[in-house]
Amino acid sequence: MLVDCAIYRDGKRVVEPESLDEFYEASRNGAGVAWLGLHEPSKEELATCAREFNLHPLAVEDAIHAHQRPKLERYGDALFLVLRSARYVEETETVEFGEIHVFAGPTFVITIRHGPASELGRVRKELESRPQLLRRGPMSIVHAIVDRVVDDYAPVLTGIENDVDEIENEVFSGESREVSRRIYRLSREVIEFRRATGPLPDVLARLIDESGDDEEKRYLRDVEDHAIRVHERLDGFHELLRNILNVNLTLETKALNEAGNRQNEEVKRISAWAAILFAPTVVGTIYGMNFEHMPELSWRLGYPMALALMVAVSGSLYLLFRRRGWI
């Protein structure tokens, strides 16, 4: 889908084509910088771009299929840059990732965006409000796009940091039973984020080497420093989440052991009282059978003797279990 397109001369927007065909026609004279913005274009749209600007087939194939890691490739006099964008969704506490592919030649810039993150409309407006930057050519547009993508990482890091703090509180308060699943889900997002930002410092270092403007190099070094700090913070989050997971597993194991111990104590109490009550039951059962030839039945002290036997056996068992801590 065509998002925006324009021809810039001397840092100002001079031609605003309404279609791709008009844009191609306006860009053919080579005067100024042609900037085309696409969002999830079709194969046919990319094919026309490739023919018009002589884009390399391998780069075009990458732009079609997406799911690329950040990288920078040179094909002739054109650069192909892949960036991974990110956006924190507060409602679901998740991170959405997108991709931005940039083709930059001597007189053109083509941006292809996949996913909802890091819209480039603000970048275009900011550059149009600063024509002195647009006068520097396509590399100034590339720098602005990279700067926007890296700056958009900041709210994502803040959201992840808040999630980590909440998880810590849940772990040590023991209020949530779903905390392990939340730790795992957030760890997956941090790992994905690390993959998105890990190659970025090397990409920016190569981009600095490609830039021939000293002022542009200084700006890109600043962006590179921000990208390195982002990756370092993600490393810290990953290590912290791993430690939190270990602590949570320890606490859960301890809780299970304590529950098992309490259950064992209850079983001991039940078994002890069952044994105590079983003794008089046996004696009563024996003398309740009423056989004719039972000497104790005709004995004058038989009844008191049976009661005394019941009390003695039950009392002995009670003292035994009491001494062992079962009751």
Image (tube, helix red, strand yellow):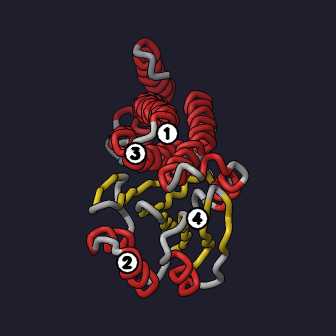
Q: Name the residue under label 2.
A: 50
Q: Quadrant of the N terminus?
A: bottom right
Q: In this view, does 147 lie to the left or right of 249?
A: right
Q: Name the residue under label 3.
A: 191
- Mark 3 to mark 2: distance in Å? 34 Å
Which amino acid lies under the numbered mark 4 shown in the image of this protein? Pro
Dot 3 or dot 2: first in sequence order is 2
Dot 3 or dot 4: first in sequence order is 4
Which label number is shown at residue 37?
none
Residue 287 image-quadrant placement: top left
| Marks 3,1: beta carbons within 8 A | no
Coordinates of residue 230 in the picture (x, y in percent): 49, 35
Disc 4 secondary structure class: loop
Disc 1 secondary structure class: helix
**Residue found at the far top of this picture:** 323
Which label number is shown at residue 216?
1
Residue at 41%, 32% (x, y): give it.
235
Q: Mark 4 points at which residue?
A: 116
Disc 3 secondary structure class: helix
Residue at 40%, 43% (x, y): give it.
211
Q: Residues within 10 Å of mark 1 (few under 14, many from 20)?
A: some
In front of the other: label 2 or label 4?
2
- Mark 4 to mark 1: distance in Å? 28 Å
Dot 2 or dot 4: first in sequence order is 2
Dot 4 or dot 1: first in sequence order is 4
Which amino acid lies under the numbered mark 1 shown in the image of this protein? Glu
- Mark 1 to mark 2: distance in Å? 28 Å
Residue at 58%, 57% (x, y): give it.
118
Task: Work out whether residue 17 or residue 98 is closer to the camera in this orientation and state it.
Answer: 17
